Image (cartoon, coloured by chain):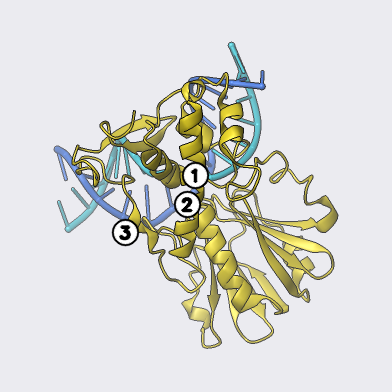
Chain colours: A yellow, B blue, C cyan
DNA sequence: CTTATGGCCTGTCAGC
DNA sequence: TGCTGACAGGCCATAA
């Protein structure tokens, strides 16, 4: 369940540990992901240097020499770990390690994804904005384009639940189930409320809490609820800050009312029926 | 344009 | 103890 804060934390760690390194070998051990990973992909990146690592929504954009960008999405259960010089080949998980990239300093990047919802795709720099995965994404929630006015405008005429709209990557990019629940709790808005019924004041709170919660989660290295691990294999620490997610039946930390669990669009939504209206 | 639904995929866990 | 079925959920395709 890597969402924006987890991917951003990963980006920062990998920027420190892997930028400037050259990929000296690459190997596919399990090509089946959301789409099959082609041998041409690994052939093309061998010999390339990692110049910069960017993030867009939940995608990691690894800029390589040769005007290539490696697009990585962690799906549900993906992880990209940076193994030290002392790794041994038998440490690799033959079932769930999909790709391994050996770097010129003797370290290795390993992509692991048990549920295979992830994605790895090589794109020419010039085609990045038109590529299917990135075209049509909404604004970054931590950027200028996302504010109360934008939320208010985009929710007019929408019958869908506000939580589903927050998770719609075409409206705003990078928010998933965990942070949508947390943002709406902080804003005092029930997840099932129709978008059209969000007031200007609520849009203001949603915008403000989206920014503060995501920023705070990035500062904590993201959230590990079940399986997420960063590039060092460490879990995120924001889980201790969660107010409602995963707390169905437990008392609200603000008022003591029992947290409710309701399924919206086949996704679990947690909220406090007293604090959220 | 919006909304609803199902499929992908497998580790984990509750319940029998 | 071992089996079964439900669940987790980001993203995409399809249909109405």
- Using the image, determine if residue B4 lies above or below residue A99: above
Residue A261 position, x and y percent, is 29, 35
Residue A170 position, x and y percent, is 63, 36
**Location of mark 2 (residue):** A212
Which chain does the numbered disc 2 sit on?
Answer: A
Do the residues indicated by labels 2 and 1 lie within the same chain of the protein? yes
Which chain does the numbered disc 3 sit on?
Answer: A
**Location of mark 1 (residue):** A208
Q: What is the secondary structure assignment of the residue under circle 1? A: helix
User: In front here: B6 or A103?
Assistant: A103
User: In front here: A191 or A36?
Assistant: A191
Q: What is the secondary structure assignment of the residue under circle 3? A: helix
On-image quarter of the C terminus of chain A? top left
Residue A92 position, x and y percent, is 50, 74
Residue that appears at 51% across and 49% down: A211
What is the C-alpha distance between the residues marked 3 and 1? 21 Å
**Location of mark 3 (residue):** A240
Residue that appears at 41% across and 58% down: A223
- Crowding around mark 2 (Cα neighbors within 10 Å: few <14, some 14 to 19, many 20+) is some
């Amino acid at each position: 369940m890597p969402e924006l804060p987890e991917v951003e934390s990963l980006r920062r760690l990998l920027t420190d540990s892997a930028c400037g390194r050259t990929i000296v070998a690459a190997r596919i051990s399990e090509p089946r992901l959301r789409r099959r990973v082609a041998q041409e992909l690994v052939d093309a990146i061998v010999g390339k240097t990692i110049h910069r690592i960017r993030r867009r929504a939940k995608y990691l954009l690894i800029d390589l020499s040769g005007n290539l960008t490696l697009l990585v999405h962690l799906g549900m259960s993906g992880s990209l770990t940076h193994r030290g010089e002392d790794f041994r080949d038998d440490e690799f998980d033959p079932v769930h390690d999909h790709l391994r990239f050996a770097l010129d300093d003797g370290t290795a990047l390993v992509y692991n994804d048990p549920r295979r919802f992830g994605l790895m795709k090589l794109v020419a720099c010039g085609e990045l904005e038109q590529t299917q995965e990135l075209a049509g994404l909404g604004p970054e929630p931590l950027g200028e384009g996302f504010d109360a006015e934008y939320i208010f405008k985009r929710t007019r005429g929408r019958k869908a639940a506000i939580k589903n709209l927050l998770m719609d990557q075409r409206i705003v990019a990078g928010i998933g189930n965990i942070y949508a629940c947390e943002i709406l709790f902080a804003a005092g808005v029930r997840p099932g409320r129709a978008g059209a019924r969000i007031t200007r004041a609520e849009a203001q709170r949603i915008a403000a809490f989206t920014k503060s919660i995501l920023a705070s989660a990035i500062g904590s290295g993201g959230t590990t609820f079940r399986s997420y691990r960063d590039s060092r294999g460490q879990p995120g620490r924001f889980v201790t800050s969660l107010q409602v997610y995963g707390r169905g039946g437990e008392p609200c930390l603000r008022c003591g009312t029992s947290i409710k669990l309701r399924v919206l669009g086949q996704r679990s939504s947690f909220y406090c029926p007293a604090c959220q209206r």
